[in-house]
Amino acid sequence: MYTEKEILQAGELIEKARRMVFFGGAGVSTESGIPDFRSQDGLYSQKYKYPPEQILSHTFFERYPEEFYKFYRDKMLFPNAEPNAAHRKLAQWEREGKLSAVITQNIDGLHQKAGSKRVLELHGSVWRNHCTRCGKSYPLEAVLESTGVLRCECGGIVKPDVVLYEEPLDGAVLEAAVKELERADLLIIGGTSLNVYPAAGLIDYFGGNNIIVVNKGEPARRRNGVLFLDGKIGEIFSKFD
């Protein structure tokens, strides 16, 4: 559990920072009621006909789109979720000119809902969908209001704009994230165990000296000089002015 001394230390680093970047994962949204993937009660510990890692792969989507969509609607969509204190604080720091970008592994769109403008979505977003044949775009509502496999008017299958296993990350998003990290003077890492690659490897591009990590339980990767706060990110962020 974090201490008040650690909160004060983190607050001082944030106060001095002029160009912060936030790198976040599933733990940022758990306080909004969205379950994470890898905790004891997370998505990957639940039992399905197929393992979630297999269902959420490009090969599975192409071979069994009906099964994919069934799982996707049931377990991946939370359209009524609301931003929590962490999302709101990040949006506030951006408005104040202290935070230059949010780099997120999440696909829920809660950072934008909270008011953040510069959000780099490494794994895409459930709010965007496109036809695999003609490229036509479809909103999330089209997925929610349909049953079975969502098809375009041209007959093609509509795919969510989320990065599935076996698919590469978007090159333009990666390039933008690297540039933001290289120019940042403070990196805040939150709600992630840093287990998911290649996304987790991005933090190696950080060019500054100060890193704050906020997570429940120690992350998989540790670096020297890192201030680690063990706890819920929304609760911790609400303590900063």
Image (cartoon, rainbow, N blue to C red):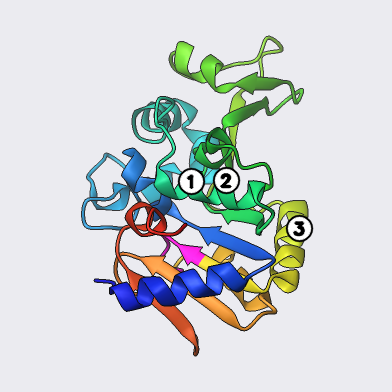
Mark sitting on residue 91: 2
185 or 29: nearer the viewer: 185
**How far apart in space, not on screen, are marks 2 and 3 (Cα)?**
19 Å
Q: Which residue is mark 3?
A: 176
**Helix, strand or loop at disc 3?**
helix
Query: In this rendering, is residue 185 above or below 192?
Result: below
Magenta span contains residue 190? yes
Circle on res. 87: 1
In the foreground, 160 or 186: 186
Q: Amino acid at mark 2?
A: Ala
Q: Give the extent of the magenta segment.
A: 189-194
Q: Earlier in the sequence, mark 2 or mark 3?
A: 2
Residue at figure coordinates x 62%, y 29% from the top left = 128
- Picture quadrant of residue 79: top left
Q: Amino acid at mark 1?
A: His
- Does residue 233 show up magenta in the picture? no
Q: How many C-alpha atoms fall within 10 Å of the one at disc 1: few (<14), some, or many (≥20)?
A: many
- On the image, the x and y values in percent for residue 21 come to 62, 63
Q: Secondary structure at mark 2?
A: helix
Secondary-structure class at tag 1? helix
Residue 54 rendering spot, x and y as whole percentages: 41, 48
The amino acid beneath tag 3 is Ala
* Residue 221 visible: no
How far apart are the two marked residues, 1 and 3, measured between alpha carbons?
Answer: 21 Å
Q: Quadrant of residue 35?
A: top left
> Does residue 120 appear left or right of residue 227 in this picture?
right
Vertical comparison of 142 with 56: above or below: above
Separation of residues labelled 1 and 2 (CA atoms):
6 Å
